[in-house]
Image (spheres, rainbow, N blue to C red):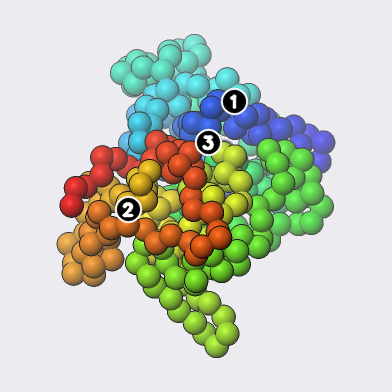
Amino acid sequence: MLLVMEWFERVARMRRWTRGGERDPHRALLLLLALGDLHRRGYTQLRYRDIEEPLGELLTEFGPAKPASPGYAFHQLAADGLWEVFTPHGTGSPGPDAAALRAYDAAGRLVPRFAKELLADPTAFAQIVHLLLQLNFEPGLHEDLRMAVGLPHEPPVPVTLAANLQGLLPRARPDVLLRQKVLVAYDCRCAFCGFEGWMGNSVVGLEAARLRWWAFDGYDDLSNALCLCTLHHRLLDRGVLSLSSSGTILVSRQFVGTTESSHALVDSLVGRKAAQPKVGFPAPHRNNIDWHVRQVFRGPARTA
């Protein structure tokens, strides 16, 4: 376990180097891609020319509006002690330039000892993935990311290992009561579309959606949360939807939907005011709205 904890700590440091609340998940996404390949094929090297396109797609789909280039991620991850880059000539990385990486036929791989210990300990493997996701992305994106890189669904977290991981997270666990607080504040209705649903005495299809992500100091408070239906929560986390500082719903121009339901559920939100919480409950704070627009939303927004 001591050796495994070394890798946990390196992964945690990789996240802590992010400054000013800005999302910069290029190294995390490359590491997830490499771990997915390790899970499927065993320990192999990854040629840059072969993973440039899939890595670029991951950066576009799950990175900020202006993501790092695949070449930059491929080169930079080596600084974290988890990844190494080499060429057929025995030299190290030729740098972050994509053309140079292709010209030198550069390849990368997980550090051998790192890969060996993860393959020997499936529980540690699963928890490295868990830690990477927790430190860089909202929970609603975790399964999408696993599917994108070819990793299995998340297994249950062993109690002893979960306790060890908590010391590597930047702060305490998210508030398990946030959803209940949000439901009360928004009268059990989606702030974007007004959906409400019940099964007996239980509310269904409604969730607490953070604007500033928990992994980036988005504290679980009503000033950082909305009550959204499952669909609009997912679209908020993927950057399809956001809010303006005045509370108007923003819809990304990059979103494409050709059916009547797409128009009714997404396009029709353009220019609409999001519902406000009941009197006595705080509305989303402008700073949290601004963070989401800068770091998650796929601008520019459509106009009414």
Secondary structure of the residue carrying tag 1 is loop
In contact (CB < 8 Å): disc 1 and disc 3: no
Q: What amino acid is labelled 3 in the image?
A: Ala
Numbered tag placed on residue 249 in the rendering: 2
Q: Mark 1 or mark 3, which has the lower sequence index? A: 1
Which residue is found at the position 66% from the left and 34% from the top? 12
Q: Distance between the residues labelled 1 and 2?
A: 32 Å
Q: Mark 1 or mark 2, which has the lower sequence index? A: 1
Q: Position of residue 194 (x, y in %)?
A: 37, 70
Query: Does residue 150 sit above or below 294 in this rendering?
Result: below
Give the mark toward the camera: 2 or 3.
2
Which residue is found at the position 45% from the left and 54% from the top? 144
The local crowd at label 1, few if under 14, some if 14 to 19, many if 20 or more residues have their Cα within 10 Å, is few
Is 289 in front, or is 93? 289
User: Pointer 3: what residue?
Assistant: 28
Q: What amino acid is labelled 1 in the image?
A: Trp
Secondary structure of the residue carrying tag 3 is helix
Secondary structure of the residue carrying tag 2 is strand
Is 43 in front, or is 145? 145
Residue 301: name its quadrant: top left
Query: Does residue 69 sit above or below 158 in this rendering?
Result: above
Q: Position of residue 9 (x, y in %)?
A: 71, 32
Residue extending furthest toward the bottom: 200
Q: Position of residue 41 (x, y in %)?
A: 51, 46
Q: What amino acid is labelled 2 in the image?
A: Ile
Residue 126 appearing in the image: no
Numbered tag placed on residue 234 in the rendering: none
Is 47 in front, or is 202? 202
User: Pointer 1: what residue?
Assistant: 17
